[in-house]
Structure formats: C-alpha cells, structure tokens
C-alpha cells in the first residue's frame, strides 16, 4: 500500500510539471501573437497614411472633388480595417492550429491593388515524438569515506542496464531548441563484491563479509521502476513544413550534426532484488532479504555527440539501503540509445 501511495504522489508531481510546461508554452504563444498583431496593425496604419496622403495631393491638384476625397478616405479606412481583421485571423490560425495554408499579402499602390503569393515555411508549433530507451554501462556504489579507486566492488563485473519508453515535446513553440523529455524505465543495477565477499544484513545494517566457499560468480542485482524527466537542449529533428508557390508540401526533418544535452531527475521504487552465487560447490539464485530503500530518486544527464554516441550518467540521491549508519549511493555511467 505504501508503494502505491508513493507512486500516486510521483504521478501527481509528473502531472504538475507537465501542466507547468504547458502553461509556459501557452504564455509564450500569447505573447508572440500579441507582438504579431501589433506588427500587422502598424504596417496597415502606415499604408493607410500613404493612401490618405495621395488623396490629399490629388485634392490639392483639383484632380478630385472634396466629396470624392472623403469617399475614398472612408473606403480605404474600411478596407484597412477589414485587412487587419483578416490578417489577425490568419495569424491566429497559423499559431494555434496544425492546418498549413498558403498565405497572401495585400499591398495598395495608388488606385491599384496587387495580390502577391509567397512561400510560407514554418515549424510545427508543438510536436510529440516517442522513443525506445536503452542504456548500458558500468555501475558502482559510492560509499562514505571510501574513494572510488578503493571501491569494494569489481569495475567491469558491476554493470547497469536501462530499458523503457520516453516521450519528447518542444517547450518553445516553433522551435526544437528546448524540449521536455519524460517517460518510464526499468533500471537494472548490479554489484560484484571483491575478495569473495557477499552482502548480508545484520540487525538492519547491510555490509560485506567473506563467503565460506570459493565463488566464481557473486553478483547482487536490484531493479527499479522509475519515471525520468529531462530538460533537453537541442534537437536533430527540425520539424519544418509548409507550402511552396506551386502548392507542394515541404518538409526538412533531420540534422545529424546537432549536439544534444539533457539534464533532469527520476523517481520511482525498488521492484526486485536477487543474489546470484556460483562456484564449484554452489549455484544459487536467491532473495538476499536486504534492507533496500523502497523509494528511489536521483539525477541523470546525457550528452549526444553528432554522428557518434550518447554519454549517459545517473546517480541515486537516495541511499541504497535504509537506516545505514553511513552513506551509500548508486552511480552509473555508460551509453544511451534513444536520442534522435
């Protein structure tokens, strides 16, 4: 029951963070729309001023009567108001909907109206993509007052693997510069003690002690179900789409030279643990019955280099075992395969 309460609390936190990101996107969208409308208003006002100036010049030269001048001014004012309204609607459609339509710009020169068609390329306001997550590398246990080079665990034999699913969406509309990546993963961590030692629990304190027979294989494996959230800088997908003058669809979706950096945190809970022992006289896979922490949380990050690979690291901020008299934190470093 406690695990379900923790999971429910974490899901509420995930929902809050996602909602906050959505509010930030909406605020950015509204601010951009206001600026675009102000630009449209200023341009149309300047155009109307030029038209009125030309009418006044024709009136001074007695090419038109005062009645004709007033009628033309009223006509151009009505046309300008209608043009502003139509461009406002077109801009709102462009920013808030996924429909991609060719736009038109109207300019007036004296008494001639010219309609010009132009190419309109734009990025999708917001996109959502999903990826399979797979990571693999080395695992260690950071222990208080013990340097990493003096670790009590084998470097090569202690490993981690992570598999899961992630979703990615851009935070800034029409841009892949800043993204939110979130998902669910299973982390599998292992530790192989040196010197034929095994984990044991004595009155709630977990430590190592020598095993009574020789072991060829000695590995503690513990798995966590976690929910990672990362802020991601950069993207290899451009998400550009639109229409050309002849009506054809344009799309440019990939840039293999981009560098991607991600940083964030994860939270979840321990779901399984087992101890594997193998030697000339023993071959067992048993429940170690150790005092594992039920709640797991930590920070993680990655750097994806162009056309090469993605470096990935994570460290638990929670201790591996509960009620230990000294600090023990799981740390992992390896490669990740899900960055587009």
Image (cartoon, grey):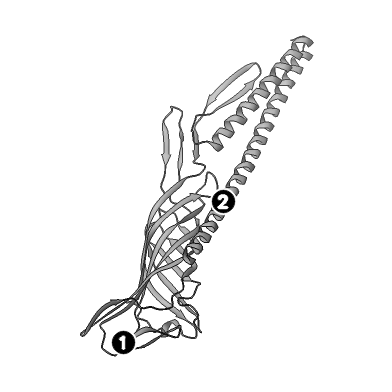
Q: Position of residue 260 (x, y in %)?
A: 46, 57
Q: Residue at x 63, y 37 (%)?
A: 36
Observer-nearest residue: 74 or 292? Answer: 292
> In this rendering, does residue 2 appear at all?
yes
Q: Position of residue 98 (x, y in %)?
A: 49, 36
Pointer 1: residues within 10 angstroms few (<14), some, or many (20+)? some
Say the numbered circle drawn on residue 117. Answer: none
State which quadrant residue 165 falls in.
bottom left
Q: Position of residue 146 (x, y in %)?
A: 46, 85
Q: Residue at x 47, y 45 (%)?
A: 127
Q: Is residue 108 left or right of residue 333?
A: right
Give the total of numbered labels: 2
In the image, residue 87 sits, relative to residue 67, either above or below, namely below
Q: Which residue is mark 2?
A: 19
Q: Which residue is mark 1?
A: 196
Q: Secondary structure at mark 1?
A: loop
């Amino acid at each position: 029951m406690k695990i379900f309460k923790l999971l429910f609390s974490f899901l509420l936190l995930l929902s809050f963070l996602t909602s906050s990101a959505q509010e930030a996107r909406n605020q950015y969208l509204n601010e951009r729309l206001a600026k675009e409308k102000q630009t449209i208003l200023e341009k149309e006002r300047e155009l109307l001023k030029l038209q009125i100036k030309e009418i006044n010049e024709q009136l001074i030269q007695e090419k038109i009567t005062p009645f004709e001048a007033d009628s033309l001014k009223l006509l151009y004012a009505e046309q300008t108001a209608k043009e502003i309204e139509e461009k406002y609607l077109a801009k709102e459609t462009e920013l808030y909907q996924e429909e991609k339509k060719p736009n038109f710009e109207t300019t007036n020169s004296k008494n001639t109206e010219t309609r010009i068609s132009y190419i309109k390329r734009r990025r999708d306001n917001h996109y959502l993509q999903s990826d399979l997550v797979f990571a693999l590398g080395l695992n260690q246990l950071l222990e208080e007052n013990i340097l990493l080079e003096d670790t009590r665990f084998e470097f090569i034999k202690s490993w981690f693997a992570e598999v899961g699913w992630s979703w990615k969406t851009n935070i800034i509309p029409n841009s892949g510069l800043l993204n939110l990546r979130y998902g669910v993963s299973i982390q599998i961590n292992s530790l192989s003690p040196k010197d034929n030692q095994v984990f044991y629990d004595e009155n709630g304190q977990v430590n190592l002690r020598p095993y009574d027979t020789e072991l060829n294989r000695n590995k503690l494996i513990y798995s966590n179900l976690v929910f990672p959230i990362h802020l991601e800088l950069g993207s290899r997908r451009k998400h550009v789409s639109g229409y050309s003058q002849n009506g054809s669809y344009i799309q440019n979706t990939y840039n293999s030279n981009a560098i991607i950096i991600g940083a964030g945190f994860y939270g979840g809970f321990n779901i399984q643990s087992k101890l594997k022992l193998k030697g000339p006289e023993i071959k067992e896979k048993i429940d170690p019955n150790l005092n594992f922490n039920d709640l797991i949380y930590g920070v993680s990050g990655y750097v994806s280099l162009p056309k090469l690979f993605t470096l990935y690291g994570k460290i638990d901020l929670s201790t591996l075992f509960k009620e230990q008299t000294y600090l023990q934190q799981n740390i992992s470093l390896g490669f990740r395969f899900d960055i587009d």
